[in-house]
């Protein structure tokens, strides 16, 4: 549970209302990763643990964001609990393929993902598998994506369109997500990313 400071900072003649702290930095890095994965809202494992009773999530990747050495699991917010049952097969296939990818079984991952080529995160994973089949990852590779910048990591992919045939755009906006999380999930207390 990371802390954040929110308020007016600076000199009396130059005040700036802002939020600072590790949680804010992580949230900013995760927001930037949406461009890479073709998603609308990415959440950390901390948020997923607190909101999983109300919302459905899909495991996207394990990343080490800029400024951090420890990897974290990241998830795509899919919508309210049970709202996307028709897409459960795509999510399940992606998570199965991701497990194979993380284990270095790139051909197995590709075989699972071929039917989901219109799903933006699947497209990213397909491209990653193909790249590693051409040039093997380093011997010490642990399946962790190293995000080299605030917006798009070093595993840069071609631009992906938001939404896809299964999910459309994420069916819940950022403000609605925050409001529902505040009202229906366990109280968050401190600001988290």
Image (spheres, helix red, strand yellow):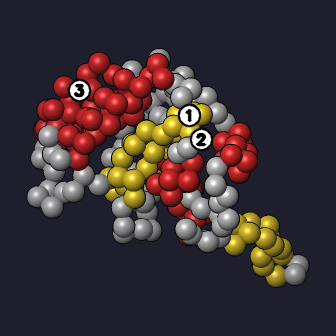
Q: Quadrant of the C terminus?
A: bottom right
Residue name at image x 11 percent, y 58 percent: 139
Q: SS of the residue at dot 1?
A: loop
| Quadrant in the picture for residue 87 | top left
Which residue in the protein does label 3 denote? 112
Q: Earlier in the sequence, mark 1 or mark 3?
A: 1
Q: Position of residue 149 (x, y in %)?
A: 45, 57
In front of the other: 43 or 121: 43
Q: Earlier in the sequence, mark 2 or mark 1?
A: 2
In front of the other: 156 or 71: 71
Which residue in the protein does label 2 denote? 54
Q: Position of residue 192 (x, y in %)?
A: 60, 62
Label 1 and label 3: CA atoms lie apart by: 25 Å
For residue 5, side relative to residue 160 (left or right):
right
Q: Position of residue 46 (x, y in %)?
A: 51, 58
For residue 115, side relative to residue 30 (left or right):
left
Badge 1 density bin: few <14, some 14–19, many ≥20, Cα 10 Å: some
Q: SS of the residue at dot 2?
A: loop
Q: Are marks 2 and 1 in contact (CB under 8 Å)?
A: yes
Is residue 154 in view from this perspective?
Answer: no
Which residue in the protein does label 1 denote? 81
Label 3 and label 2: CA atoms lie apart by: 28 Å
Mark 3 against mark 2, which lies toward the viewer?
2
Residue name at image x 14 percent, y 40 percent: 105
Residue name at image x 43 percent, y 50 percent: 74
Residue name at image x 44 percent, y 68 percent: 67
């Amino acid at each position: 549970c990371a802390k954040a400071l929110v308020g007016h900072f600076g000199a009396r003649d130059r005040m700036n209302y802002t939020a600072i702290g590790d949680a804010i930095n992580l949230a900013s890095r995760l927001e930037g990763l949406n461009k890479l994965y073709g998603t609308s809202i990415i959440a950390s494992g901390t948020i997923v643990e607190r909101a999983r009773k109300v919302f459905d999530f899909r495991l996207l990747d394990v990343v080490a964001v800029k400024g951090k050495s420890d990897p974290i699991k990241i998830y795509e917010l899919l919508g309210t609990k049970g709202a996307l049952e028709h897409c459960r097969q795509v999510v399940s296939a992606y998570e199965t393929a991701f497990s194979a990818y993380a284990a270095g079984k790139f051909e197995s991952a590709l075989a699972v993902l071929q039917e989901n080529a219109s799903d933006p995160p699947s497209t990213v994973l397909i491209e990653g598998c193909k790249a590693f089949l051409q040039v093997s990852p380093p011997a010490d590779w642990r399946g962790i994506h190293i995000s080299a910048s605030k917006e798009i990591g070093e595993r840069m992919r071609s631009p992906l369109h938001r939404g896809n045939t299964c999910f459309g755009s994420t069916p819940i906006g950022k403000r609605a997500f925050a409001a529902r999380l505040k009202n229906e999930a366990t109280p968050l207390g401190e600001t988290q990313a």
